[in-house]
Amino acid sequence: MVNIGIDCRLASSPTGLGRYTREIVSELVLLDSGVKWTLFVNESIDWIPKSEFISNIVTTNIPHYSLSEQIKFPRIIKKQNLDLLFVPHFNVPLNCPVPFVATVHDLILHSYPNQSSLIKRLAYKKLLLSTVRKSKSLIAVSKYTADEIEKAYGSEAFKKTTVVSEAVNPIFKKQSEEDSKSILKKYGIDKPFFMYIGNAKEHKNVNTLIQAFADAKIKDTELVLILSGPEAEKLKSPAEVKKIKNVADSDLPHIYSQARAFVTASLYEGFCLPILEARSCGCPVIASNSTAIKELGAPGVLLVEPNIAAFAEAFKNFVAPDFVEPSNRLWKDVALETQSILLQANQVQ
């Protein structure tokens, strides 16, 4: 039996990284592959998957990107006698005591360095460089991210990088208008609407959506922004733009299903999971033709330039397509591909 550890501390996060961690780990631990899994989780977590192949759950209280992550976490890892560690993000301790595989979702601070302080940027660059150099293998969630890794770290890093794209949870499927009424009422959505979900950081370009929607002047229609993160509070929005926080995952399929379209003017994405979620709920998509988003094009997805004029025109002239192609990729598929990378990395030590 191979003993593989997984850093699950991000599973408690409401972000896309948290969802990726929960989804992939939930499927990995169900695979009968001759692996015993050791999970490292936060004390506060209310999610722990069940499987006969989980041999140990190690509870920690170590924040991400912290000094204790660099000092205490390696000691905890060492005690578990692991053959390999899988980290679903780039934040592998500099002195990780065991071989490891890491997932790189994006290189956002390479393109938008001002989103963090100088100290955080320096720590990010040192940590990511260490992870790229020392990893047995790297997983990139898109071809775009893999190409970014090659551009930043060279051909050797690219050679050990495998693209494993993300997937959609089965809860994301078309919901009827009748079944969705109470959900829309719960969030005060009472008009036809376009929707966005995500944070409001600089690269998300949310102000472009707001201004474009205002310029389009669409009667009796609103733009619903489902927002996370502190940047949301700084957004100024007109009356026809509704800001919502803390939407339950179970409610999202209903909101996607009744939206006229999911919209994003993002300037940088390592993937863009909401596009797949929207498509799987039969929701059309209007998205910027940038970075990894271009890899998610399909019937029902309109790609436009990420500027106010282009999005205003897309809003104003929007006609629901006859067909929106759902995503058929499952998280089990992601887990199988990831498992293959982990087992191969263990063999080449």
Image (cartoon, rainbow, N blue to C red):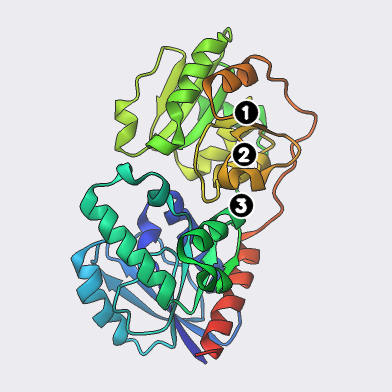
Question: SS of the residue at dot 3?
Answer: loop
In percent of the image, x 44 and y 76: which residue is there?
A: 135
Where does residue 118 sit, x and y in percent of width and height? 23, 50
Query: Could you tell me the amino acid type at mark 1?
Result: Ala
On the rendered structure, is 306 left or right of 188? right
The alpha-carbon separation of the residues under discs 3 and 2 comes to 10 Å
The alpha-carbon separation of the residues under discs 2 and 1 comes to 8 Å
Question: Which residue is under mark 1?
Answer: 261
In percent of the image, x 52 and y 86: which residue is there?
A: 346
Question: Which residue is under mark 2?
Answer: 278
Around disc 2, counting alpha carbons within 10 Å, would you say few (fewer than 14), some (14 to 19), or many (20 or more)?
many
Query: Could you tell me the amino acid type at mark 3?
Result: Val
Q: Earlier in the sequence, mark 3 or mark 2?
A: 3
Residue 23 in view here? no
Question: Which residue is under mark 3?
Answer: 168
Where does residue 182 sit, x and y in percent of width and height? 53, 28
Where does residue 184 sit, x and y in percent of width and height? 52, 26
The alpha-carbon separation of the residues under discs 3 and 1 comes to 18 Å
On the rendered structure, is 56 left or right of 259? left
